[in-house]
Amino acid sequence: MSSHPPGVGATPASSDGRVNLAGEGSSIARERILSLVDEGTFIETEAYVQHRSVLGTMNLNRPLGDGVVTGHGKVGGRAIILLAQEPGVFGGSMGEMHARRIASAVDLANRTMRPIIAIWDGEGQRVEDGVPALGATGEILDSLASCSGRIPIISVIIGTVAGASALAAGLSDFVILEAERGRMFMRSPWLIPEIASGELDEEELGGAKAHSSRSGVACLVAEDEGDAFDLALDILSFLPDHTEAVPPRSECSDDLLRECPELNDIVPDDANKPYDMRDVIEDVVDDSVFLELFPDYAENIVIGFARMGGRPVGVVGNQPSILAGCLDIDASVKASRFIRTCDVFNLPLITFVDVPGFLPGTVQEWGGIIRHGAKLLYAYAEATVPKLTVVTRKAYGGAYLAMSCKNLRSDVNLAWPSGELAVMGAEGAVRIIHRRDLKDAGNPEAEFERLVGEYKTKFGDPYTAARHGWVDDVIEPRQTRTRLIGGLLPLDGKREEMIPKKHGNIPL
């Protein structure tokens, strides 16, 4: 159990209906933290902090801790920094001292280079504290920005989080929403016309479904509170303590030399028929365990964590069953952020490619697909971790380039016999190159089929790509697992010197 001052714990309500932590009882926030950490390892910090507001009846209610619990403990023997808002104290709202206590915990994590798990269950800024609360929240945002790329930050949203508090959670590497109660808003929902008029309710606007499928804020949705904590620990199990550390490896119970015969028949003979890239990923990785992130957002690309030979890796794959695997704005942003996350935390990247191109249309063009697609290309080019790529079928044009091609310094590039590396699909290329010949042909359909076959033989065949050095080898699909594990071995100590500069200017 944690060590904390006498009387710190949730309590009966005060005269204004708010719970006073200074009485008898248990703290929800502390109980949540204790359910996460190894027994007996949690040490609370700054437990005597109290707010300084004198507005209204605030001076009559000064609970110790000011509505948040912070400290450090161990998870599976790993030291981490934890913080949890107390929903029973001023609704979990963020006052000046509440915010400064969080900022202090984040600073401790930054100094000691320990991961952070933050449990958010507060209603935004505390109005009674005014600008001092806002200023202290700025300290949190500054501290979190400083931590970004140094240590893993995981946020669990269990209650309603709004305003600057939502921004703080949004600075995390991973955001998990509890399905029933987790909600996030940029502004108080009651200041939004659609809510005030009854056109939408809070759940539709800022609930788990909205943020997992529409906004892309939540990487995972948990069934309940316990599931949310389990997911946070699952994510942490793939990550190192900090950017200079090696991700934790585990004993591999799966055969390192296991072949995947099912993959030989997974790609349909008809190039226009879909298949599920998750089936490929799960067949290749250790014990078929794949922790997919953002499964309901930009479903035309798949990302997540897995292990290969006991080594944590990040996996990216086009999804042919959604939009034929085309890249669009959301898919580009989703994958780019994940690639950069894997890069800063030293996880090798394995990419499965089946992409016919960028999604066409005015919505995409006017929405900035050029800029957003460039993010994906930039993220791969910038990443210095081991990069391994498998072309399973289509790899066309600029989308092929953006998916960890050899020219973006991918370390190992493999292709299946079904792989097609080309500027565009054979049908489209023939219509452009041979448009006059087709117009004059006696039997245009037969001539078209002949020319398509000829084009595929000359340009789309993976052996042609191998002869030009665009792929390292053409392999049978069943060999994919063994070849990827073998490809990772010599890259274990990979070091890549970058040109000295303050930082790149990714096209945000």
Image (cartoon, rainbow, N blue to C red):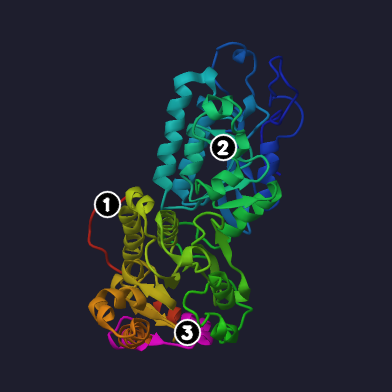
Mark 1 in CB contact with mark 2 (< 8 angstroms)? no
Instruction: Report the residue marked by disc 3.
Output: 483
Q: Earlier in the sequence, mark 3 or mark 1?
A: 3
| Distance in Å between CA atoms under marks 3 and 2 | 46 Å
Mark 1 surroundings within 10 Å by alpha-carbon count, few (fewer than 14), some (14 through 19), many (20 or more): few
Residue at left 57%, top 38%? 206
| Secondary element at image label 2 | helix
Residue at left 65%, top 44%? 33
Residue at left 46%, top 36%? 140
Describe residue 138's horizontal placement relative to residue 248 as left or right. Answer: left
Stretch of the chain drawn in magenta:
463-486
Q: Position of residue 46 (x, y in %)?
A: 57, 33
Asked whether 324 or 428 is in front, the reply is 428
Q: Position of residue 249 (x, y in %)?
A: 55, 70
**Amino acid at the residue labelled 3:** Arg
Q: Residue 94: tell me if it is visible.
A: no
Describe residue 435's horizontal placement relative to residue 209 as left or right. Answer: left
Describe residue 132's horizontal placement relative to residue 40 as left or right. Answer: left
**Which SS type dominates the magenta stretch?**
helix
Query: Which labelled disc corresponds to residue 205?
Result: 2
Instruction: Report the residue marked by disc 1.
Output: 505
Tell me the quarter of the image containing the N terminus: top right
- Work out whether 97 lies above or below 394: above
Residue at left 58%, top 67%? 290
| Distance in Å between CA atoms under marks 3 and 1 | 35 Å
Front: mark 3 or 2:
2
Determine if the magenta segment contains residue 285.
Answer: no
Asked whether 453 or 250 is in front, the reply is 453
Q: Residue furthest top?
A: 56
Mark 3 in CB contact with mark 1 (< 8 angstroms)? no
**Amino acid at the residue labelled 2:** Leu
Q: Quadrant of residue 410?
A: bottom left
